[in-house]
Image (spheres, coloured by chain):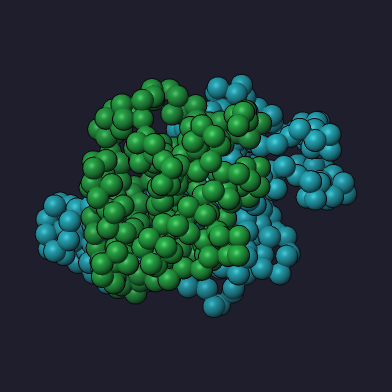
Chain colours: A green, B cyan
Amino acid sequence: MLRYLHAADLARHPRLAHSMFTDRADQFARRLGWDVSVSDSGEERDAYDAQNPLYAIWELPDGRHGGSMRFLPTTGRTMVNDHFAFLNDGHPIESPFIWECTRFCISPRADHRAAPALALAAGELMEAHSLTQFVAVFDARMERIYRRMGLTPEVLGRRGTGSAAIGVGLWSMDAAAFAPTLARVGISRATSRRWLAASLSPLHDLAIPA
Amino acid sequence: MGNRLERLLDSVQAATTLEDFQTATEKTRALYRVRHVVYHWVNSEGERFGAGTYPDAWVDRYLAQDYLRMDPVIFGCFQRFTPANWKDLDWSSKPARVMLHDALDHGLGNQGYSVPVRGPNGQFALFTLNHEAEDDVWAGFIARNGRDLMILAHEFNRKALEFELGEAAQTVPSLSPRELAAMRALAMGKSRAQAAADLSISEHTLRVYIESARHKLGALNTTHAVARALSSGLIIV
């Protein structure tokens, strides 16, 4: 299932959170060779994880992480405005309706539903929060996944080469993309909306048995 | 609604005193026909400041009981950047339920919607609407007005930061060359496709510059943003 969790909510889901941060270490440090820091416990975290971001997480049946991405509004501190200021002539891109999406991660354990589920999560967030688009930092593999999902990212700049190449750009999920994405996840729109509602209302957030 | 909201945004932007600020909360209440509207903030030094329509008796009671220490609205919103329907917050503790009943006894409605806003240096603010309504009616109200309330919340906060920073505050927003170029093209009556072609960017990319400019100008929509860019002298056509 999809969970939408703010950083402060992760404490209620320790197994899910730990497996997300270790999968991130595996993807960004080991496989892509990005210059990221990994803790003694094998977790990859950066300064933006401390900015109270919202995570969309695909949870596997065993309660572990299958895939995730991290969102922050561009009205606060963001990676794109700190490190990719050329996007807007050195000025910040700034709007509560433009969120940045970073650390798009798919677990090696993930099923084929993980990537479309995350695309779906992005679509639900766009609709629920009147977002115009996402500004994103991604690697070449994620760019291919975006394209396969029909999300057509628009790359505005790249840094580095090979597997360590980092792209920055824009993407959005249009209304037309919902039906094929839902089909790939194998759920109805009603179920998708229920997952979003359940996450935003912790009181109704029924724990799934491990 | 659109024009009235534009006028409200204009009056928030024109506020020069705390009284103007207070009046803006009252105008917001009248526009949305809700029981209460409150803008409440904690600045970088931990000082509190608020403006709004809550009855004095409730404000006094809130301070006397030190509800700030356990208010689920404050706690819930401090840990998120997305707005909260009060119904979705954690009211399960006994002190929280006591506070809620006390609030109802003091004339507050049973529903609320709070938009958290963060400024520089740890400044944190909440823009809240409170009303008496059935759950589904309130959910519908939020769905219809959520976007506009987000814009209003940011305008109240921008003004509050100006008050805090005094003369250091920027009264004319700083737009990037591409944001200005996008505004100028639209002001000249060009379509988005033409404007994008002029700037040698896609329409998707143009949309980012327009939206970022809209936010920096504190405008309700693109047309309003262009009008503000013209009236503030940022662009000349």
Residue at figure coordinates x 38%, y 60% from the top left = A31
| Whether residue A153 is situated above or below residue A34 in the rendered picture | above
**Direction from residue A139 to residue B70 in the image, left or right:** right
Depth check, front residue: B88 or A39: A39
Q: Residue A86, how many percent across, how many down?
A: 30, 72
Residue at figure coordinates x 69%, y 31% from the top left = B109
**Direction from residue A92 to residue B197 in the image, left or right:** left
Q: Residue A59, how many percent across, how many down?
A: 50, 37
Depth check, front residue: A66 or A180: A66
| Whether residue B195 is situated above or below residue B93 in the rendered picture | below
For the view shown, which residue lies furthest in the right direction?
A: B64
Residue at figure coordinates x 56%, y 37% from the top left = A63
Depth check, front residue: A173 or A38: A38
Q: Residue A124, how many percent across, how many down?
A: 41, 36
Say whether residue B103 is visible: yes
Say whether residue B25 is visible: no
**Direction from residue B163 to residue A124 in the image, left or right:** left
Q: Residue A190, how many percent across, how many down?
A: 43, 22
Q: Quadrant of the N terminus of chain B?
A: top left
Residue at figure coordinates x 29%, y 64% from the top left = A163
For the view shown, which residue lies furthest in the bottom direction?
A: B168
**Direction from residue A163 to residue B163 in the image, left or right:** right
Q: Quadrant of the C terminus of chain B?
A: bottom left
Q: How many numbered marks does the figure carry?
A: 0
